[in-house]
Image (cartoon, rainbow, N blue to C red):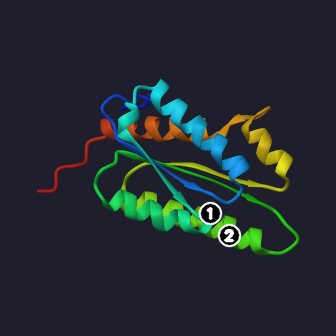
């Protein structure tokens, strides 16, 4: 039996952070947390790019384009969708999440998931550096850890 465990080792890695400008009061601290985590775990600041998109809906397309560039070892997706009085939340949150999952699977490159889907602004603030920590930091660490564990798993020979 083999067991693989990754560590959030960022030295020599290039990472892109794709973030939504909508709800910037929430997303700016998420981006700051992700940047702090990446640098704290060894990613050189010059090896990090940040791509801003209008909202959560645009995250999957920007993530797909960034990963298709071949420049990055990992991606961190950040945004905040807060429930309102219409079903808009359900469509945006669900489809953006599904789109990011597809990007990750298609590219075979880790996507740290930092898209908050909260019922209230207070819940989002609590997860963007408040009492529940910073989910931008957490998503960045998860992306680095997954990158490391995938490096340990060698593809089977095809021939």
Question: Does 116 appear above or below 39?
Answer: below
Residue, x 71% and y 56% (percent of image)? Answer: 23
Q: Quadrant of residue 144?
A: top left
**Residue 45 appears in view:** yes
Give the side of residue 89 with respect to residue 103, left or right. right
> Which quadrant does the C terminus fall into?
bottom left
Residue 16 position, x and y percent, is 43, 48
From the image, which quarter does the N terminus lie in?
top left
Place of residue 150 in the rendered image (x, y in percent of width and height, measured from the top left): 36, 41
Above or below residue 99? Residue 109 is above
Query: Where residue 2 sits: x, y (%)?
Result: 36, 32
Q: Residue at x 76, y 74 (%)?
A: 88
Farthest residue to the right: give it. Answer: 85
| Vertical comparison of 8 with 116: above or below | above
Residue 92: mark:
2
- 114 or 26: which is nearer to us? 26
Q: Nearer the viewer, residue 24 or 56?
A: 24
Residue at x-position 80% and y-position 32%: 131
Bin the neighbour count of mark 2 within 10 Å (Cα to Cα): few under 14, some 14-19, many 20 and up.
some
Residue 148 visible in image: no
Q: Which of the marked residues, 2 or 1, is nearer the chain's N terminus?
A: 1
Circle on res. 56: 1
Residue 153 locus on image (x, y percent): 31, 40
Quarter of the view holding residue 79: bottom right
Instruction: Find the distance from the CA under tag 2 to the CA under tag 1.
Output: 7 Å
Determine whether, in the image, residue 88 is placed left or right of residue 94.
right
For label 1, the crowd category at 10 Å Cα-Cα, with few meaning under 14, some 14 to 19 and many 20 or more, is: many
> Foreground residue, 10 or 58?
58
Total numbered circles: 2
Which label sits on residue 64?
A: none
- CB atoms at circles 2 and 1 under 8 Å apart? yes
């Amino acid at each position: 039996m083999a067991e693989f465990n990754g560590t959030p080792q960022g030295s020599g890695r290039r990472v892109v952070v794709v973030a939504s400008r909508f709800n910037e009061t929430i997303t700016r601290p998420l981006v700051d947390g992700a940047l702090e985590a990446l640098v704290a775990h060894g990613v050189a600041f010059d090896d990090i790019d940040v791509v801003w998109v209008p909202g959560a809906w645009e995250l999957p397309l920007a993530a797909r384009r960034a990963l298709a560039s071949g420049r990055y070892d990992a991606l961190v997706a950040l945004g905040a969708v807060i429930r309102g009085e219409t079903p808009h939340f359900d469509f945006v949150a669900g489809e953006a999440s599904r789109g990011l999952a597809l990007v990750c699977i298609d590219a075979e490159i880790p996507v740290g998931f930092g898209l908050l889907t909260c019922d209230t602004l207070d819940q989002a603030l609590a997860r963007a550096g408040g009492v529940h920590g910073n989910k931008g930091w957490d998503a960045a660490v998860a992306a680095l850890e997954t990158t490391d564990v995938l490096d340990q798993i060698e593809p089977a020979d095809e021939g």
